[in-house]
Image (spheres, rainbow, N blue to C red):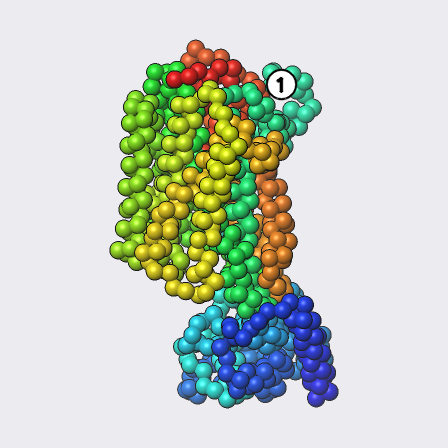
Amino acid sequence: MGTRRLVIQLQLLCSLVLVSVSASTSASFSVSLEHQPIPMAPVNYVAASRLRRLAVEFFDCYENITLADISMEMNQDPRALPSAQDLECLADLMLLTENLGSAKIWALRMIDSWGSLPSGVLYGNLRDLGNYDECLKVDHAVSTSHSVRGKYCFAKVSLASSISSLLSMKAAVCFPASCSAAHMDTMLRRLFEKLLNVEISSDLQLVDESTCRTAERKPYDGLTIFTIVVLSVLCALMVLSTLYDYLFIEDQKQFSPLVKAFSARANSRVLFRIVDTKSSPNIIDCLHGMRCLSFIWVVYGHDYLVAAMGPNLNLIQAFTWTKSAYSMLIQYGVYSVDTFFFLSGLLLVVIALRTMERTKGKLNIPMMYLHRYLRLTPVLAMAILIYMKILPISGDGPLYGSVTFDNYTICEQTWYWSLLYVQNYATDTICLGHSWYLAVDMQLYIISPLLLIALYKWGKKGAAAISVLMLLLAAGLFITMVIGKHSIFSHTSDAMPTIYFSTHTRASPYLVGILFGYFLHANRGVAVKLNRTVVSLGWLISLALLFTCIFSLYGYHNNNKALPIVNEAFNLTLTRIAWPLGLCWVVFACMHGYGGLANSFLSSPLWQPLSKLSYSAYIFHMFIESLNGGITRTNTFFSDYQVMLRFWGDFGLTLLLAFFVYILIEAPFGNLENLLLSTHRTKKKQPDLDAQQKTVGAIEAPATDSTPAPALVTISPLPEVRTKEKPTNN
């Protein structure tokens, strides 16, 4: 009994520490809870407070544990025979109870790792993670063939199951690994019913095996080994090529293109080379800054999702945050993707129409498609393998695998849809959730030759036809939302695949980009002189459009008003056109000297390396965010500043990983594509790989023409643009 009192004192001390920390945290941040309390009756709260010393209560209740205590079947039918696992679990629990009485350190560590009722439940702190590593490191040898090892799980107590399943407290528990989740569920159910004086429904599962972790790791399967081997081979090729380049190559022109393709030294030169913005008429300086800022916006917004899924101490404040004006920048960060689509259409037309003029309207359409597929697919294919097989073994933690954006195990069934770029239509379970964007971009690229031919042959009439097409698609989006009651604002289940992922509903920014690109092409070389009033008016209209898109629904969020579906349909339909229209002025003003500080910032050459990394960074940024979110060991505090701290860490690691992917996969395969497709170009001398970057890297559309990573190859789906060509008037 002396040991039991020692344990109780230990648990009381821990509880006091947690309460003091919770109190100091609450004093530092003032939030009104009067309007959004946790729906929990005072009587239930007082009863639940008995669970603060959960481990003590448990071992006090089961001091003399029997088979009937751990097996629901034997409790209902005493004649039922126990299974081997029942007997092993009982033996380990009896040994644990006995060793607690004799103050064995391994037994004390097992109960010391338990969680308790979280401090600040009424403030939204609903999870106590206990001590994950302390539980898993328990390994007490009983005999040469058997050891008692720790098994970490979450026990759930519902606060208001009739309102939401999310309103439940979760506390970490640590049992012998020989016990199953069903054993824990049976014992904890009886304990909670006794302490809370309530009857818990048999339909409510208190302990789920999916939340349990042990120190034992599964052996690698064949696909995991294959992925590791492929990455190792690529690393070996990169290291050997780089060493050969560094030690033996003095004249880069004598460097074998096949070996140079894998050289990190050569590819890094390309990556960090700052291109002279005056080297080509196709260069639009400010686009690098626009695409980089849009990518930063994507990462920042996803970090808020990770933070929201974390074990926050202040869930109430997180709900309050959604009503703030600042939160609109995050909740409507989806316009960053519309920026990518706008840039994609703009760059395509600016480059293609110049080329078609010299080739008299000819397009090598099969080569366009082949080039695009070979540029995108190597990085995407490796990403599928890495997310599916490398991410699960890259980290560990009580929340690992749950603080994530997708269930990457579904890639085993749907990976081929992603490699065909039809995943946004072909399946409801997309392998990599954010790869929907690649599918939409690819599908728009496939139909782009028709639009380019229309613009080349019919000029303004073709532009008018594209405008009508855009309006028809916008009308289709409106009708689909109103008739089908598809609401992104209200989070209806079918809104994302129908409204968000579909190409025909996301085409408006792309078509605006195409029309604006045609406008720039038709007026190239024309001197534009605007007075101060017109420039000021242009900026006012542009900023009004952009800010209206972001903040137009702020009143509904702030007042918890329901948004009528007709209003939402109007808003979404019009803002998908208004946002790229606002960007048109930004680009136009920066090109013609009316951008001021905006142009100086967006056109900074420092954006160019990040712009080249943005495709790999976009594909792999969720790897970093899922990894860092999953390895969390303690509760977190939700605030804008805390998310900003998380963002800089995630963003920095994302860039490092993107650089590694670039020199390991993206650049080498881009160079190999150059060597492969160059065999189809006869009577043309292959230019030096480094020299080509001075033009193509600056003017070619990004790897996706929207998540830019300028190409590493001279072979383009379109004939090469001459950098010294002087612009001529139509």
Query: Which residue was labeled with disc 1?
Result: 252
Q: Residue drawn at (48%, 48%), measured in percent from left and top?
A: 547
Q: Secondary structure at mark 1?
A: helix
- Percent coordinates x, y for residue 188 in the rendering: 52, 80
Q: Residue at x 51, y 65 (%)?
A: 319
Q: Is residue 656 above or below residue 371?
A: below
Quadrant in the rendering for residue 596: top right
Q: Position of residue 725 (x, y in %)?
A: 48, 15
Q: Is 307 placed above or below 679 here?
A: below
Q: In the picture provided, is 112 more to the left or to the right than 361?
A: right
The structure residue drawn at horizontal position 43% and vertical position 61%, both measured from the top left corner, is 556
Horizontal and vertical percent for residue 13?
A: 71, 78
Give residue 72's quadrant in the image: bottom left
Residue drawn at (41%, 34%) of the image: 513
User: Which image quarter holds the C terminus?
Assistant: top left
Is residue 195 visible in the rendered image? The answer is yes
The amino acid on which the numbered mark 1 sits, given as a three-letter code, is: Gln
Q: Who is closer to the viewer here, 562 or 401?
A: 562
Q: Dot 1, how many residues are within 10 Å of its Cα: few (below 14), some (14-19), or many (20+)?
A: some
Image quarter for residue 148?
bottom right
Q: Nearer the viewer, residue 490 or 240?
A: 490
In the rendered image, the vertical position of residue 218 relative to residue 426, given as above or below: below
> In the rendered image, which quarter contains the N terminus?
bottom right
Work out whether residue 235 can be spotted.
Answer: no
